[in-house]
Image (tube, grey):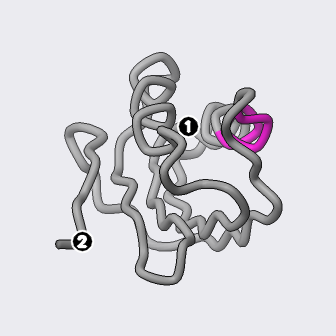
């Protein structure tokens, strides 16, 4: 059971629809850490850390979204661990 940290760029209908709060709610449910933030180009950036299989399940849940969220694309890359203590929503302004 390995721990991983992934940087994920979400695009689609992901701003103004509660995506960051959806991500935080499910981060608590899946017990993962990191952050999520809106970017100026309309995409959403996330870094998420946890057990590899848990992070994968978490990202599948986010990809499904809900009736407001429409994730068209997820660009995922592995990055070094940071050992965050929580999952937070970052503001860009």
Q: Position of residue 70 (x, y in %)?
A: 76, 47
Q: Residue at x 67, y 35 (%)?
A: 68
Q: Main secondary structure of the magenta part?
A: helix
Q: Nearer the viewer, residue 68 or 32?
A: 68
Q: Position of residue 81 (x, y in %)?
A: 39, 62
Distance between the alpha carbons at the discs numbered 1 and 2: 28 Å
Q: Within 10 angstroms of label 1, few (less than 14), some, or many (20 or more) residues?
A: some
Q: Position of residue 26 (x, y in %)?
A: 51, 25
Q: Residue at x 76, y 44 (%)?
A: 63
Q: Secondary structure at mark 2?
A: loop
Q: Which mark is residue 38?
A: none
Q: Position of residue 64 (x, y in %)?
A: 79, 35
In this rendering, the answer to whether 68 lies above or below 82 is above
Dot 2 corresponds to which residue? Answer: 92
In this rendering, the answer to whether 20 lies above or below 53 is below
Q: Please say whether residue 61 is one of the residues in the magenta stretch.
A: yes
Question: Could you tell whether 92 is left or right of 39 in the image?
Answer: left
Q: Residue furthest top?
A: 29
Q: Residue at x 42, y 81 (%)?
A: 40
**Image quarter in which the N terminus is found:** top right
Dot 1 corresponds to which residue? Answer: 51
Of label 1 and label 2, which has the lower sequence position? 1
The magenta-colored residue range is 59-65
Q: Residue at x 68, y 67 (%)?
A: 11
Q: Please say whether residue 9 is one of the residues in the magenta stretch.
A: no
């Amino acid at each position: 059971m390995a721990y991983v940290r992934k940087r994920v760029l979400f695009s689609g209908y992901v701003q103004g629809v509660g995506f960051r709060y959806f991500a935080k709610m499910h981060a608590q449910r899946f017990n993962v850490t990191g952050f999520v933030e809106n970017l100026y180009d309309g995409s959403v950036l996330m870094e998420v850390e946890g057990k590899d299989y848990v992070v994968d399940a978490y990202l599948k849940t986010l990809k499904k979204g809900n009736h407001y969220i429409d994730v068209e694309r997820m660009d995922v890359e592995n990055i070094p661990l940071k050992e965050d203590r929580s999952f937070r929503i970052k503001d860009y302004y």
